Amino acid sequence: MAALQEYKCPCCGGAITFDSGLQKLKCPYCDTEFEVDTLLSYDQDLNADSEGTLTWESRPENQWQPGETDGMRVYVCKSCGGEVIGDETLAATACPYCGNPVVMMGQFRGDLKPDLVIPFKLDKEAAKDGLTKHLSGKRLLPKVFRTQNHINEVKGMYVPFWLFDSKANGTIRYKATKIRTWSDSRYNYTETSYYSVIRGGTLEFENIPADGSSKMPDDLTESLEPYDLKDAVDFQTAYLSGYFADKYDVDAEQCTERINSRVKHSTESAFASTVQGYTTVIPEGGSVNCINGRAKYILLPVWLLTTTWNSQQYIFAMNGQTGKFVGNLPMDKSAFAKYFFSIAAAVSAAVFAVLYIMWML
């Protein structure tokens, strides 16, 4: 069994959670509020915790097969004594028996402790409102989806991210042209001048995010960007109380290829934006190298919503700091067909009108 940390109200003994509106911990029973810093002593236990051991005197008849318990973690709720079972990345959750929020302290020992955290700014109701706004104005969305889909779950989760700082040295060569045209009474002339253009330099990048969880699709988490890092604070487990959280299972080294790709693309775009005044510009070659890369470990707030329609599950996500909402939606094929043909008919009518006017002239 591994150790759990529960934040208890010293006034009434109730479980306290982080309130995104107050930016404080609050007891839902007696409404007492606490500054996060007042619970700093809890975090001092991060490096002192050790995994407990349990020895059984007898063995049950049904045994786990080899490999079945790999990655499984079992915790004991301090409030009701119930077992909380999760995988090896689970870092904060709620007891399935009494509902009390719990934090798995052992998941943040030593190098596993995040450097920073952005606390939730928006609550569960804001996430539900975000879904409503996301559905509004979608002309091709099945009408039945708006009325018959039900939110299965709304879950606030701290997702592990890496923030990379890096420099990029690059040199890129372009083939460019300038085309000049003119005419006289006898001929039309075209003059094409060719140029070799070189751009080079050093760019500095700060806080490039990379998802550190294999459970979260990269395209989903990257769609929630950007986060405002001015709200980032030093990590304390108190911010996790009342939310779900995972520790990273994709380390910084495994993220470098994706980060290098983003740095390279951004550098190429920055250089290309300086090549102006030409008719055409085509990259011919060059190189971009990343140097002095450093990574910080941060937890970022995400609201996850799931809904089911026509036996298919749809997952939506909202940035818990800014409210940016993303998620795929079903499409009404019949509505799409009507919309497509109405546009085609309008375009055809416009073309016919133009041709008729030209013929009349």
Image (tube, rainbow, N blue to C red):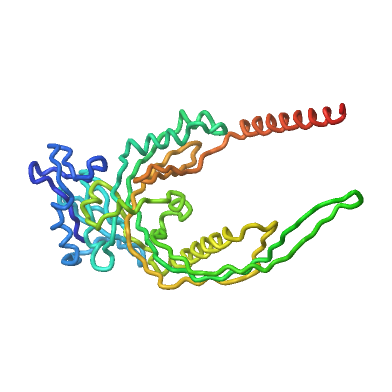
State left or right for residue 239 relative to residue 300: left
State left or right for residue 281 relative to residue 145: right
Residue 63 lies, in percent from the top left, at 30, 62
On the image, which quarter does residue 29 sit in? top left
Q: Is residue 252 above or below residue 21?
A: below
Q: Nearer the viewer, residue 89 or 320?
A: 320
Residue 333 lies, in percent from the top left, at 61, 35
Q: Is residue 28 above or below residue 176?
A: above
Furthest toward the left, the residue is 11
Quarter of the rendering occupied by the C terminus: top right
State left or right for residue 75 relative to residue 149: left
Residue drawn 39% across and 58% down?
A: 213
The mark total stands at 0
On the image, which quarter does residue 49 sit in? bottom left
> From where the camera sits, is residue 53 visible?
no
Residue drawn 56% across and 63% down?
A: 271
Residue 331 lies, in percent from the top left, at 57, 37
